[in-house]
Amino acid sequence: MSRPLLLLAVALGAGALAGPGLGPAAAAWLLLFAAMLLASSLAATERSGVAALAFAAAGIGAAAAAAESSAYDRAPLRRELVMGALEGRQVLLRGRAAEDGRERGDRWTLVVDVETIAWRGEARETPGRARIDVRGQAPRREVVEGDALELWAELYAPRGFGTPGAYDAAAEARRDGVHARGACKSPRLVRHLGPSATGWRGLATAVRAAARRRIRQAVLPGAEQGLVRAMVLGDRTGLDQETAETFRAAGTYHVLAISGAQVALVAALLAALLARLEVPRPARAVIVCAALGFYAELVGGDVPVARAAWMGAVLVAGRCLDLDADLANLLGLAALLTVVHRPSAVGDVAFQLSFAATLGILLLAAPLARGAPALPLRIEWALAASLAAQLALAPLLLSHFHRLAPAALLLNLAAVPLSAAVLLTGTVAALCPPAWAAAQQLAGDAAWVAAHALLRSADPVRLVAALDARLPGPPPWAVAVFLCGLAGLARGRGRKAAAWVTAVGLLALVLGRRPPAADGKLHLAVVDVGQGDCLVVRTPRGRTWLVDAGGSFDGRFDVGEAVVAPYLWSLGIRRLEGIVVTHAHFDHSGGVPFLLRAFDVGEVWEGPRPRRDGGYQRLDAALREAKVVRRSVGRGVRADWDGVAVEVLGPPGGPPPWRTRNDDSVVLALRAGGVRMLLTGDVEGGGEAALSPGRAAVLKVAHHGSRSSSTLRFLDEVKPALAVVSAGRHSRFGHPHPEVVERYHRRGTRLFRTDRDGTVTVSTDGTGLEVSSWP
C-alpha cells in the first residue's frame, strides 16, 4: 500500500460521517473493536494489516463523532433551549466574542461564547456558543475576538427546514459548535465589558484588526476592497451576495477563500528569509511551523487553512529531517489530523471541497497532462490541473450546489494568477508601517486594479446563462461509476477504458436523477418554507405545477434557491409546467425569480396586477427577464392538469388594486375523481365571504392560520376533513393563531402544520387520501 495515510483518512472520515447518531454504548463498543483490530494488525501481513488499520480508523472516527455530538447536546445552553426554558425568551447574555463581529449592511452578527445568562432577575452559568444577529442602524463599536460582552437577545435552538434537500441550519450549527441562534434589537443593547484576549490569540486579533484598518485606508471602498479583505484576512463581510454568486457560477469561488496558496506563500517567504539569515535548519523548521500556526489563527482557522497549515508543517518538518514526502499521503495525514481534532469537519462542505480539489490535482493532473498536446508556456499543465480539480469536485458540486461550472476550466487560467496578484499586493498594503504611507497607497492601488480584473474575469458567466446550468443532485450509483473512472485515470493503466468510464459516469451524474414515475395519483405537497407558502402539485401523469414559492421578509435569504429548488431537485424535477403566483407578497413570490432562472417553466399564472407596488414590480421585472408566458387569471377560469379539474374561484375581478392585497389572492380548487382540494392563498375574512368555495376534503389554510381568516361561516361551508397550515416556527405574527387552531379541532378536522410537521404531502387516487410528513 503506497499511500496508507490516505486510506486511513478516508476510513476515518467515513466513520465520522456515520458516528453522530450513535449512542455512548455503541461508541464504546466501537472503540473496543478498534483496539482489537489495532492489536491484530501488529501480527498481520502488510496487506491485511493495512485493512485492519482502516477498519480500526473507521471505528475510531465513528466513536469520536459520537462523542463530539454527545458533548454538543450536553452543553448547558443547548439543554436549556431544547427543554424550552429559554426558547424565545429575552435574556441577558454575558460572555466573550468567539470571532470578530461581522457587519453586512443593516445587520451585525456576533458569535459569543456565553458564560452566564440572566433571566427573571436570576443569573446562572450556562456555557455554550450563540450566534446573534443585531439589527438596527445605531452606532456600532468594533468587536474583535476575545472582547468581553453583555447583550440582550432572544434565543432559539438552531433548526433547519423540514424539507428534503433544503438548507439545514441545524446541521451547520452543529458543525460550527453553535448551540443557539438569537436576535438583538439594537446595537445599543450590546455593551463592552472588558479588553480583548491576551497571549497568542490576543496578538493574532490585534494584528488582524490593524491589517484590516490599513486595507480600508489603502484600497478604495467597494467590491474590490471586499475581495482584498477576503483573500488576505479571510474577512468576507465586504463581499456582497451578487459578487459571491458570480464567482460560484464561474467555478472560481475557491480563489476567495484563504487556503493552500496563502499558506504556501507565508511558508516560502519566511523559509527564504531564514535561509538567507543562515538560521540552522531545525530552528528554521520550528519557526516556520509556529508561523503557520499563528497565520491560521490570524485568518480564522477555516478548514482549507487548517489543511494547508497541517500539510505545510509536516512538509517543513520532513524536509528538516531529510524525509521525502508523497504529497497525496501528506494530504491524508492532514485530513487525519483535521478529523481527529474535529470529527464534524468531515461533513463540512469546505472540508470536502478543499480536500477533493487538492487530491484531484495531486492524482489526476499529471496523467491528464501527459495525454495532452504540448502548448506554449506549458499551458497544458495548467489546463490539466484545472480539469483535474473540476473532475474531482463534480459530484460534490452537483450534490451541494446543483451546478457543474464548466467555464471554470478556462476561467481559472485567469483567476488563479489574478488572485495571486491580489494576495501579494493586498498583503503589502496590510503590512506597510504608517511611516511608509506612499508605499502603502501604491500597494493598495495595485491591489484594487488586480481585484477589479479578478471581478471582470467572471463576467462570461453573467453574459452566457448556459454556463451556469442548474441540475438535480446525482444518484449514488452514478457517483460510484464516475469515481471508478477517475481511479482508473489516476492509476494510469488502461487510460482509454478509464476515460470512457469517466465520460459515462459524468453523463450519469448529469442525467441519472429522474423524476418519480407517474402513478395515476394527484399529489399535493405543502413545503416547509418557514413563514410563507409553497405548494407543489404533481399530476397523475407525473407533471409538476407550483403554487407560490415562499420568500424571506428581509430579502437576504433566497428561499427559492435554498429550499424550494433543492426540494424539486431531490425529486429529480427539472421542468415546471407552470407557476401560480397567488399574489405578490414576498413570502409567496420571493422564490419565483430564482426558479425562473433554474428551471424550464411553461407558463405563469397571476392575479390582478397592482398599479403601484414594490413587491410586484420586482416580480414583474423577473418575469419580463425570463420571457415566460404569462396569464392573468380570475374567477371562472378553468383548466385541466392531466385529468385534474382546476377552477379559479377568486379573485372576483374589478379594477386593478393600487397595491397587492391579501384578498386579491388567486384561489384554486383541484378535483381528482371524488376528492376536492382548496388552495386559498392569503385571503382574509372579506375574501372568504366573496367566494363560493363548496365542500373540499383538503384545505390549505388561508393566510398561515391568521385570526383574520378561517371564519366560522367559511369552515361550515367547506367542511374540510384535512387542513394544512404553512407557517414558520416561532412566527413573529403568531401564526397559526390558537383561536383558529381551536376552530379546526372543534370541527374534527385533522390539522397539519409545517412549523411542527415539516413538509406535508397529501395524495389521492380520486377516492381516498394518503398523508405523510417529512421528516
Image (cartoon, rainbow, N blue to C red):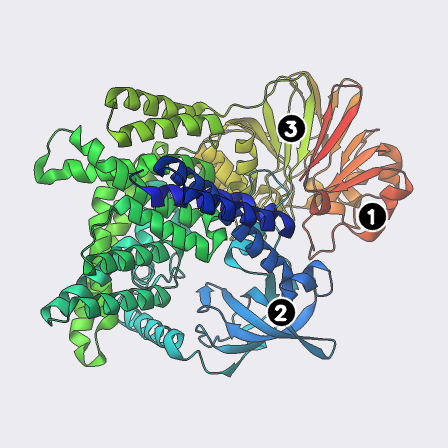
Residue at figure coordinates x 79%, y 23% from the top left: 675
Q: Secondary structure at mark 3?
A: strand
* Residue named by callout 3: 537
Secondary element type, mark 1: helix
347 with respect to 704 (left or right): left
Where does the image place residue 229, in percent across and percent down from the top left? 32, 63
Residue extending farthest to the right is 746
Disc 2 packing (10 Å; few <14; some 14–19; many ≥20): many
Gap between marks 1 and 3 measured at Cα? 26 Å
Q: Amino acid at mark 2?
A: Ala
* Residue density around tag 1, few if under 14, some if 14–19, many if 20 or more, within 10 Å: some
Discs 2/1, front: 2
Image quarter of residue 384: top left
Residue 153: assigned label: 2
Q: Label 2 to label 1, Cα distance in Å? A: 30 Å
Front-most of residues 165 and 576: 165
Looking at the image, which residue sits at the far front?
Answer: 43
- In this rendering, would 98 be left or right of 308? right
Q: Nearer the viewer, residue 21 or 249?
A: 21
Residue ID at (87%, 47%): 742
Residue in the picture at 55% in, 56% down: 68
Q: Is residue 693 left or right of residue 414?
A: right
